[in-house]
Amino acid sequence: MDIRKSIRAQYLKLLDREPDLDDLDYYFAELETHRMELDDLTIILRNSNEFKELVKHQKTPELHIASIDTYNDIRIKGKTISTGYRNSEKRYDEIFKFCKQFNRPISVLDLGAAEGYFTFRLAEDFSGVFIAVESNPERKLLELCIKNNNRKVLLLDKQMNLKNLKNLKEVQHFDIVLALNIIHHFDEPFQDVLDTLVSMSSFCFMEHPNPLEDDSTKNSQRLEKEKLKLDSFEPVLLNKNESGLGNLLNQKLERNLWLLKNTQSKTIDRGWRGASKYDEEFGPGNHISVKSNFDTIDVDYGLRDEKRTWIQGIDLRTFLENNGVYPTNDEVLNLINNLKIDNAKDLGPHNLILNGEGLFPIDQDDKLDAVNTKEKLKDFLKQSGLL
Ligand SMILES: C[S@@+](CC[C@H](N)C(=O)[O-])C[C@H]1O[C@@H](n2cnc3c(N)ncnc32)[C@H](O)[C@@H]1O
């Protein structure tokens, strides 16, 4: 692996954050000149106070499960080629019916996508951008993305924690989040995870285990204690589906599929993860508002006298920081090379919206930035260990 990427990977693994650019440069020089090895960096990070503080609050990592059953159906190029142990089709029918109401492209985040059934089907049936998040290699989702070869699909190979979700909420908005059988996988309070997911979306489909399920269901002992409160989301019960898990009795227990609505204002709170929040920079109440309905979606900058049409997608920085693997790094490089832009002013990766088909620059009327050419952008991404 490239040295900068390896340093970044160690920081993410041990400190759960991006390295500062100065530290990245420093360790890059040390490793490149063999004054230290990667193992030495691991030891340094493990000995840091930051690491010690982090592990104090961490739960014991889950043991790796050696083999898994296919959870949802496998879909390749419009055909279901094998079935999973949960009924995927009945659940998809409800999601499809709802999405039919949109008269415009949509953006969907499918958290814990497993074999990607919902992402692939939505990308077959609708225009827009469909982002799957899945980190378990045994799901083989990258392979399935390559086989499906649908440019509307993006894949983040990332095990999200609550902090990662909150970071994502601050910089992105999705028309729809699929939170299907995923919230109970989190170590953090289930309600905080759900609230964050609803806050980054306009609508959220949520399926959660039945509290009566036994310990064949992950974190089953927390289900009764941490009952989810849905009232503020105008919940609509869409259907019920058997858990399909564990002994015969457990398999028959039904899980509710809910449609939830974000009834609060929909905002984007900062330009990119490392930047200050708009309300810190420009005063309280400043943020970008997302104004959307089934026909249109626009962004309103509040104080700035500017309104613009929304480009569906995810900014390149957020995609790479969250370990975006599809489109692949090579394809992203091609997209950068093919970018059509005259008089670029700021080609920072937070200013490029990726939607699989291409990269679309935004905010090119502001001040001139140091990263203002494709070559400088590529250098910047390499320097930061992102590409
Ligand atoms: C029970 S399956 C649900 C699959 C799919 N959403 C469905 O309902 O058909 C949960 C999936 O989420 C993934 N997962 C669990 N925790 C995750 C996290 N924190 N971030 C991303 N994926 C996660 C697991 O690897 C697993 O494939």
Image (cartoon, grey):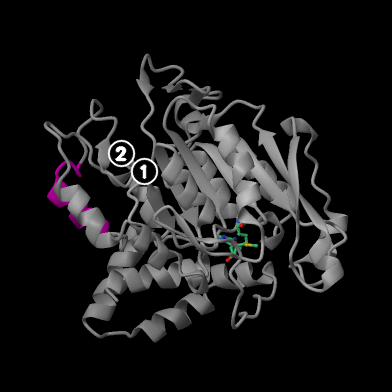
Amino acid on which the number 1 mark rests in the picture: Asp
Identity of the residue drawn at 29% across and 30% down: 363
Residue closest to the eye, 373 or 190: 190
* Residue tagged 1: 315
Q: Position of residue 289 (x, y in %)?
A: 50, 24
Q: Is residue 342 highlighted in magenta? A: no
Q: What's the distance in space between the residues labelled 2 and 1, CA to CA?
A: 7 Å
N-terminal of the pair, mark 2 or mark 1, is 1
Q: Main secondary structure of the magenta part?
A: helix
Label 1 CA crowd tier, 10 Å (few <14, some 14–19, many 20+): many
Quadrant that contains the C terminus? bottom left
Label 2 near ligand 1 (CB < 8 Å): no
For the record, the magenta segment spans 370-381
What residue is shown at x 80% (from left), y 55% (from top)?
254
Q: Which residue bears the numbered disc 2? A: 351
Q: Is residue 379 magenta?
A: yes
Q: Is there any visible trace of residue 272 in the rendered image?
A: no
Tell me which corner region of the image, top left, top right, bottom left or bottom right, holds residue 221: bottom right
Contact? badges 2 and 1 (CB < 8 Å): yes
